[in-house]
C-alpha cells in the first residue's frame, strides 16, 4: 500500500472518530472533560495527516506519519484510562468524577439553571459492553498501527 494511501486512511480514521463524537454530542450525549481530552490528539492527527499529504518528500512524510502515530497512541491511552475510570478500575480526576464537584457550590448543584455536570466515571452510552471511551481507545490503537505502518513500510 502506498505511503499516501496509508496516511489518508489514518487521517480519515481520526476524522471519522471526531465526526462520531460530534454526532453523539448533537443528539444529546454531552461530553465530559476526559472526552474532550481524547479529541485533541485526533485534531492534531488530522492536521498532521493533511500536512503529510501535502509534503513532496517521502522522508518527511514518514516523520509526520510517526507524529501521527504518537497522536493516535496518545488518544488511545487517554481512552483506555477513561474506560478504566468508568469501570472503577482506578480513580479519575476529582474534578469530573463522583468524588468531586468540579468547583461548583452547593447552590450551583441545587439550581435548575446551574451548569450541567457530566461525570467522567459514568458511562453514557455503550455498545457490546464497551463505552465510547473504550471504543475510542481500541479504534485509535488500530489507527496508530496504520500510522506506524506508514512511517516504517510505506512506499
Image: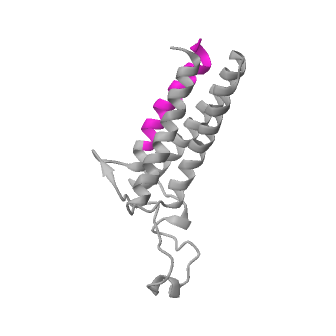
Q: Residue at x 59, y 11 (%)?
A: 155
| Magenta residue span | 136-155
Query: How many numbered marks appear?
Result: 0
**Left or right of residue 28: residue 153:** right
Q: Is residue 105 magenta?
A: no
**Above or below for 136 versus 61:** below
Instruction: Using residue 148 as the reference point, say whether residue 122 is left or right of it.
Output: left
Give the answer, above or below, for where 124 lies relative to 43. Answer: below
Q: Is residue 21 visible?
A: yes
Residue in view at x 45 percent, y 43 percent: 136
- Residue that extends furthest to the top in the rendered view of this protein: 155
Residue 117 image point, x, y percent: 47, 71
Q: Position of residue 132 (x, y in %)?
A: 40, 49
Determine whether 116 is above or below 18 in the image: below
Q: For the stretch drawn in magenta, what is the main secondary structure?
A: helix
Q: Nearer the viewer, residue 139 or 97?
A: 139
Question: Residue at position x 42%, y 59% from top?
Answer: 26
Of 10 and 95, nearer the camera is 10
Q: Decide whether residue 142 is among the magenta residues.
A: yes
Q: Nearer the viewer, residue 56 or 85?
A: 56
Residue 51 image point, x, y percent: 68, 31
Q: Give how far across and how far down residue 142 sits, in percent.
A: 46, 30
Height in image: 23 above or below 77? below
Asked whether residue 88 appears in the rendered view, the answer is no
Amino acid at each position: 500500500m502506498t505511503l499516501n494511501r496509508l496516511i489518508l486512511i489514518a487521517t480519515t480514521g481520526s476524522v471519522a472518530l471526531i465526526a462520531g463524537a460530534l454526532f453523539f454530542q448533537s443528539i444529546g450525549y454531552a461530553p465530559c472533560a476526559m472526552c474532550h481530552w481524547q479529541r485533541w490528539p485526533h485534531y492534531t492527527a488530522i492536521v498532521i495527516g493533511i500536512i503529510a499529504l501535502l509534503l513532496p518528500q517521502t522522508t518527511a512524510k514518514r516523520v509526520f506519519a510517526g507524529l501521527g502515530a504518537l497522536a493516535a497512541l496518545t488518544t488511545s491511552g487517554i481512552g483506555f484510562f477513561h474506560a478504566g475510570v468508568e469501570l472503577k478500575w482506578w480513580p479519575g480526576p476529582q474534578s469530573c468524577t463522583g468524588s468531586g464537584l468540579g468547583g461548583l457550590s452547593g447552590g450551583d448543584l441545587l439550581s435548575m439553571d446551574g451548569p450541567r455536570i457530566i461525570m467522567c466515571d459514568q458511562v453514557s452510552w455503550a455498545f457490546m459492553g464497551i463505552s465510547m471511551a473504550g471504543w475510542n481507545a481500541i479504534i485509535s490503537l488500530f489507527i496508530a498501527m496504520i500510522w506506524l505502518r506508514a512511517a516504517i513500510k510505506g512506499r
